[in-house]
Amino acid sequence: MAAAALIGLGAAIPLDRLAQGPAIPSRIPATFPRTWAYGTASHATFAPHAMVASNNRLAAEVGAEIMEQGGNAIDAAVATGFALAVTFPEAGNLGGGGYMVIRMADGRVAALDYRETAPLAATRDMYVGANGKLTGESVIGPRASGVPGAVAGMLEAHRRYGVLPVAKVLAPAIRLASEGFIVDSTFFRSLSGDKYRIEGFAGKSVFFPDGVPPQIGSRLRQPQLARTIGLISDSGAVVFYRGSIADSIVAEMRRDGGLITKADLGRYRPVWREPIRSSYRGYSLITMPPSSSGGITVTETLNILEAYGPAAPFGTAERVHAVASASQRAFVDRNSKLGDPAFVGVPLSTLTSKSYARSVAKSISRDHADPTTRVASRMREGNETTHWSVVDPSGNAVATTSTLNDLYGSGVYVSGGGFFLNDEMDDFTTQPGTPNMFGLIQGEANSIAPGKRMLSAISPTIVLDPGGSLLLVTGARGGPRIISATSQIILNVIDHRMSLADALSAPRLHHQALPDSIRLEAGGFDPAVIARLRAMGHYVYELNSGIAAAASVIRVKGGYEGMDDPRSHGGAVGF
Ligand code: GLY
């Protein structure tokens, strides 16, 4: 048949819809500057039935293995999460927390908030020293840790949506911890880079047994962690929050003056929330509401860009200016108005409304930058969280992101438990007006209070095409840059019609309002574009490190493509 459609009673039906159900939007090859690091080298993995994409390939293999045994996307996401705690301890965790967005093939959607909470003994100014300056205790050591939510959260997701027994779902993680896995150069470098953080605590004997990380090519076994996951498999979350693992966490706290008590652990609960549902140029988004700022800020950024008008071509000064200016404005709202909805009123419906976005978009000039207040930057490169995306053979989808905050969290390692504790307390406003480790200057809405969830940037998002069919499952690691990467991947797929490989490889920009500047990935933007942005009044500088790292799955003709970010070292595994 010559034509690409059958003509019925006045309606054209695309051939690919006839071949396999919903239509697949065609993709257009992207072009990037010759200086760009990920120009043509990256590629996605294709599989006809199911896919897991993760920042760690061994963990992605676990997710695929579970689906091949009959598990659904939630079983696979939970199995991947526990495996990440073993094979990717820099960010995968039992001692941290995260967020999960679910869309079942029958159209049900859910969002699970398994973020850490501040211990009951936490106080608003607990990190401000007698000299009025921050003490640094929010980023390293036992006082940096929030009450972990990862174990309760993953088991709760499994309880509500999983189909395989929990013992089957956790078995691969137990196997990887007890039998070990081969240390590769990426893991070796990661451990070496964070030696200073780990060696002051009990993890030294596991990760630096002779003062150096395990040799590349050697097998790392973690028997304590295998025992902990085995206990969770046998007894459920209760052993972690009220039983022997809780005792080990509290003992670790007592050794060095940490705040988490048995009462804190006993009262921890993950929270099911209504996902944010929004749209962008006819596509639907299902994303994470507060206590993460991610979904609101992604939604607001995209709404502003939709109101601003048609997208200029990728990589042009006009496009960078529009995306950066929308992002700057969404971050102004994020940094000042958002916090844990159990403690502060969050203007969710305003910030995600199209009419609000239209009024904000009007404030963006076509040819010059508007300054946020100028401040000194303490911005650091953050990549300490981990995201994974899953689609199963029925079309159920999960986007979930988990974090210890810094790489290896607070550095505190629970003796007898075999895992690191987070340093998530630094995501609170530790001191109004003072930047946190990501350079974010946040407001009172995110101040510390007992039992409160610290604001996150985590942005797990599921995109449906205009026909309502699953298109994209995405999210990223990288502190506030998660919001930029997630937004820009969605823009690349919808506005620029990029393939998944191009959408993830494309050079990124970041503007978080303060510091008042556009960060561009070095080599990704033409010098003439940068000159034009500067002429518009933007303060621009190029970063030699990547802006976040995503792991995504997209529906393509005949199946799915999955990919870990070229800025990362994981992989996608499907069948
Ligand atoms: N700890 C990084 C975040 O949750 O945004």
Image (cartoon, grey):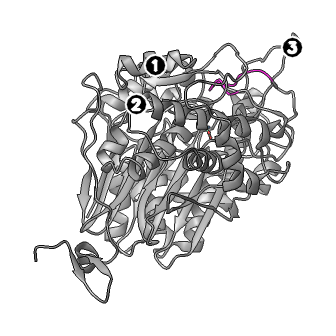
- Picture coordinates of residue 6, whole percent (x, y): 22, 81
SS for dot 1: helix
Q: Which mark is residue 532?
A: 1
Question: Is residue 80 depicted above or below 20 in this figure?
Answer: above
- Picture coordinates of residue 316, whole percent (x, y): 40, 31
Q: Could you say which quadrant of the image residue 275 lies in?
A: bottom right
**Mark 1 and mark 3: Cα distance apart in space:** 42 Å
Please report the residue visible at 59 percent of the width from the left and 44 percent of the height from the top.
301
Residue labelled with disc 3: 132
Ligand 1 visible in quadrant: top right
- Picture coordinates of residue 297, whole percent (x, y): 63, 45
Q: Which mark is residue 404?
A: none
- Please state which of residues 278 and 195 is positioned toward the viewer in this rendering: 278
Residue type, mark 3 in image: Gly
Horizontal side, residue 137 vs residue 73: left or right: right
Q: Which residues are magenta?
A: 433-440
In this view, the residue farthest toward the bottom is 9
Residue type, mark 2 in image: Thr
Question: Is residue 184 depicted above or below 339 in this figure?
Answer: above
Q: Which mark is residue 316?
A: 2
- Please state which of residues 259 and 517 is positioned toward the viewer in this rendering: 517
Q: Is residue 437 magenta?
A: yes
